[in-house]
Image (tube, rainbow, N blue to C red):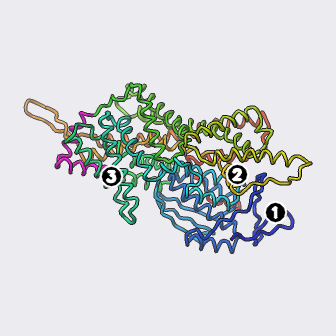
Amino acid sequence: MASQHETDPLSGEPTEPNGQQVRPIRRDVELSQRVFDVNTLPADMRRVYGHLEKQFGEEYALLFIFTMRTAVELHRAWHMTLLTSNILQQIKDEFGLRMTWNLGVVRLKFRVEDGGYELHRKVPYDYDSEYQDIYYRISMALIEGQITVHEALLYQSETKIGVHTATIGLFLRNFPGRLVLYPLQAAACAVIFFNGTWVDAGVAAICGLFAGLLEYGLSYVDGQAKMLIDVLVGVSTGIIGGLWYNYVGKCCISSVFLGTLYWFFYGTAFVIGILEIIAGELETGVTRFVAVSVKTFVLSLGASLGLMISSGGGASAVWFESEKHCDSNFVHGTPWRIPLYLLCSVAVLGQYRLPVDQYWRGLIVMLVAYEVQYQVFDVINEYFTKDHLDTATSNIAGGASGVAAACALSWVVNTCREFYSAQLLQKNPNESSSRIGNFIYRLIRCSVKAFSCLRIGRRSDILKLGMEEKLKVQHKELSDPSHPRDRIDLPLEEEDLFIETIVGAQDINIWAILMPAVYQLVPGSIIARMWFHSIFPSPPQEIVLGTTEVLKVPQTTQESVFSNLMVISTSLALGLILGFALVQICSFSLNRLTESCSKESDEKIEIRKRRQKMMEGMYTSPDDDPRSSLIR
């Protein structure tokens, strides 16, 4: 149960029993008091909560719990330690938490009260754009004082059980619905990225479906059986691909393998690792890079063993023989290249669990990044035949353009959502009732109804439209001196809608729509090629020196593939850094121009500074070292 708040005799604000003042909530509608049940927490978190609650009050203890849960779920959803640390630092600074953390690749450590209490968590990686966006918005709503810590914790719990996810999202989020994504992504990737044909797409789809069934089955097995997923997926892909090649029809084995295993290559980890190394997080960056390299090798070796089993030991001969069935020009210059890429992107967005009604955001960013990368490389590659500068340039351009597209789209969405939410909550009626405000509100209202008809939106989005009508009537009655109404009253179910609207009105997480685009640009397949070339080394090149003498020179394919991996990883990381830096410069210049032309409210200045600080955390390590008291 929540402890009863006392009142400060001077300020009149509520306080904790130990005298610590409780921060007031900024909203016009008074909601019923909600209490988070700490008994639902794990035993170790309950123990630490109990100690902190006795010493510093309930709110301080709950803020520690909220911060830790936020870190765990954000880390699970994207593994972006730089941005997660930035968000945690903002919570820590806003509420004065005496807390530190160490976010590793898998293991997380949390310390509070100068190490008096320390909790550890092991958090495996899992793609989840929806959760990273929701948990980010919950944190921003709490920091801005629009929800209480009880409401924030309850919202987190509701998110975990799917209360704030659409029905179609719940279907694609977990098995068995998730099975439809595996063959779709495998088939599309085999053709669009790995020189495959339609035959290869069909074989990859079969391999992808079987890989999904394997992961589905092993997901129900407890213990260390889950560690076999990569091995079994690789072996099954090799067996199916080999059997098809030997007994059904010829195909490009490399495109089938790489297209199928693309789902399991954590390609973004290469770029994130380079970003962390550049930002000074050497331990995390190097560990991540090595870990994903080993994981990729396990998948590649498993596929090679499966090919050996299905080919009677002649895996190497099949691998090299199948290369003549690959077609590097199959996609180039065709009118269906972009539609096929978008189809592949739809599967990727499903893998990333982005809400279906937000696919259009992800597709825009992914298409911009891919097309810029593709066109730049197509234009300049003929001038750089002896080096990798064409690849580096196209990757930098693609990464930077993806960041710019994500930031621009986020700004447009945030601006529109601000008008829409203000109308729903009847906040600033004069501003939200302007012509442009009414137009944006009607446009989003129509899109909400359209998504509802298509069964891809949330039911709560439709219910909010009814809540808006009730709030409008009650606000009119409240402003009428002759009417007896003295407060806004909402039933409990509409209070839930009210809080969901507040959280949904926060800025969207840029990385929620940028990460899938980076995933499509990253070199997960490049390091897989390196491992395959290690397993199946190219035969030595024969050079005739005379009439009878032949010199055999070893091929250097492995070294060139590894150098290509470094070029792609580093250039993409530099592209992201350059993109965020350019966005910051443009944003700073625009803000200066706005300040000189008009007077901003203190609230808007505070929000703008917080956005700027969050932008810095996209690619830099936060400085959380305490300053000396002697420094002024």
Tell me residue 426's x, y (percent): 76, 45
Q: Please give left or right for residue 63 compared with residue 77 in the image.
A: right
Residue that carries the numbered disc 2 in the rendered image: 498
Is 185 drawn above or below residue 158 in the view shown?
A: above
Which element carries disc 1, helix, strand or loop? loop
Tell me residue 47's x, y (percent): 59, 74
Which element carries disc 2, helix, strand or loop? helix
Q: Distance from label 3 to label 2 (Cα)? A: 45 Å
**Circle 2: is it few (<14), some (14-19), or many (20+) Cα within 10 Å?**
many
Residue that carries the numbered disc 3 in the rendered image: 233
Q: Nearer the viewer, residue 522 or 32?
A: 32
Q: Residue furthest right?
A: 482
Q: Is residue 320 magenta?
A: yes
Q: Mark 1 or 2, which is nearer the eye?
A: 2
Q: Nearer the viewer, residue 456 or 69?
A: 456
Q: Residue furthest left?
A: 548
**What residue is at 19 percent from the left and 36 percent from the top?**
541
Is 6 drawn above or below residue 409 in the view shown?
A: below
Residue that carries the numbered disc 1 in the rendered image: 13
Magenta residues span 299-325
Give the residue type that dot 3 points to: Val
Q: Nearer the viewer, residue 23 or 275?
A: 23
